[in-house]
Image (spheres, rainbow, N blue to C red):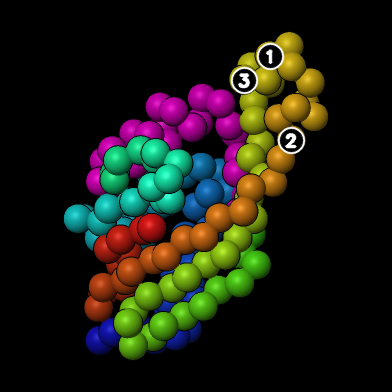
Amino acid sequence: MSPTSSDLQQIAGAFLHAFKDLSAKGHIALRAPACMQIFAPSSLNPPSPKSNDVFGAHIENNVRPVMDHFPVTAKEIHVNETGRQVTIRANGKPGFKEEAIGDSSREEWDYTGEYIFILDVDEDGKIVRVL
């Protein structure tokens, strides 16, 4: 049975919640085994698409050493129930670790980013693609 609009809203919320403590396991638990994370826009020369294993390693090896949390809050969530797709417009404020900041002032590292995520979901309610 395909996920309902309510299911897709819950998936979006769980996806954003996984950023709070930078839980690679939390992210991967929401995804189908063959899920790919695609970064955009191409004009910024983003990293190549990442499988679940590569994305999990990226969180653990590249992100967690410099951040201890990254709360992301939805500004808008749009659900396409028929297409099993969710578009999320969100803000996120990374919490950088003191050792990453070093001798810089905290103000230099203080910013809030704006993000758009598009989640494609399969009939089992698992994310198959993150853009």
Could you tell me how far apart the alpha carbons at marks 3 and 2 are, in whole angstroms?
13 Å
| 110, above or below 32, in the image | above
Q: Earlier in the sequence, mark 3 or mark 2?
A: 3
The boundaries of the magenta stretch are: 51-72
What residue is shown at x 39% (from left), y 39% (from top)?
A: 45
> Please, what secondary structure does the residue beneath circle 1 have?
loop
Q: Which x, y percent locates residue 77?
A: 55, 73
Q: Amino acid at mark 2?
A: Asp
**Is 102 in front, or is 32?**
102
Q: Amino acid at mark 1?
A: Gly
> Please, what secondary structure does the residue beneath circle 2 have?
loop
Query: Is label 3 in contact with label 2 (beta carbons under 8 Å)?
Result: no
Q: Mark on residue 52?
A: none
Q: Which residue is mark 3?
A: 100
Packing grade of label 3 (10 A; few <14, some 14-19, many >=20) is few
Q: Which residue is mark 2?
A: 110
State the image quarter where residue 125 is shown.
bottom left
Q: How many marks?
A: 3
Query: Is label 1 in contact with label 3 (beta carbons under 8 Å)?
Result: yes
What residue is shown at x 64% (from left), y 30% (from top)?
A: 96
Could you tell me how far apart the alpha carbons at marks 2 and 1 are, in whole angstroms?
14 Å
Q: Which residue is mark 1?
A: 102
* Labels 3, 2: front one: 2
Packing grade of label 1 (10 A; few <14, some 14-19, many >=20) is few
Q: Is residue 64 left or right of residue 119?
A: right
| 113, above or below 83, in the image | above
